[in-house]
Amino acid sequence: MHVPSLLAALAIMLVGSVYPLLFANASGQADHGLAMALFWAMSAGLVRGVGFVPRWFGWRWLFSGWACAAGLLLAAWLRSGV
């Protein structure tokens, strides 16, 4: 079990459920890039957080704790509008 990844995934899931405008842009429309980054971080966090480690290196990287962090950083960068 990888607790930081699991906590990040659960936080994204709960905050996104309570406040769905998190996935929207300033005009209220869906921000698909931001949603993709957050859903990737959530998926990677859930997979790694429960302790599952895929065998194939590609899946292992896409669903790692580092991928969860990368997804969160990408989401923060997209949200900042830089």
Image (spheres, rainbow, N blue to C red):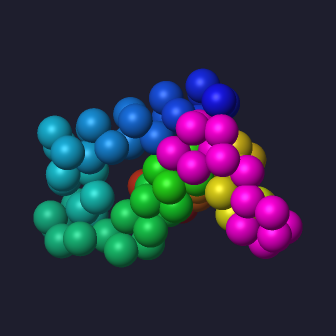
Q: Residue 22 appears at what percent x and percent y?
A: 27, 50
Which quarter of the picture shows residue 62? bottom right
Q: Is residue 51 magenta?
A: yes
Q: Is residue 81 visible?
A: no
Q: Residue 56 appears at what percent x and percent y?
A: 81, 70
Vertical side of 12 occupied by 32: above or below: below
Which residue extends farthest top?
Answer: 3
Residue interval drawn in magenta? 46-59
Vertical side of 26 occupied by 7: above or below: above
Q: Is residue 28 left or right of residue 69?
A: left
Q: Is residue 38 magenta?
A: no
Q: Is residue 73 left or right of residue 46?
A: right
Q: Residue 49 appears at what percent x and percent y?
A: 59, 37
Vertical side of 33 occupied by 17: above or below: above
Query: Front-most of 52 and 24?
Result: 52
Q: Is residue 23 left or right of residue 17?
A: right
Question: Image point 23% across, 71% down: which residue?
Answer: 30
Q: Is residue 62 visible?
A: yes
Q: Residue 59 appears at what percent x and percent y?
A: 72, 68
Which residue extends farthest right?
Answer: 57
Query: Front-most of 10 and 77?
Result: 10
Question: Image point 16% across, 39% down: which residue?
Answer: 18
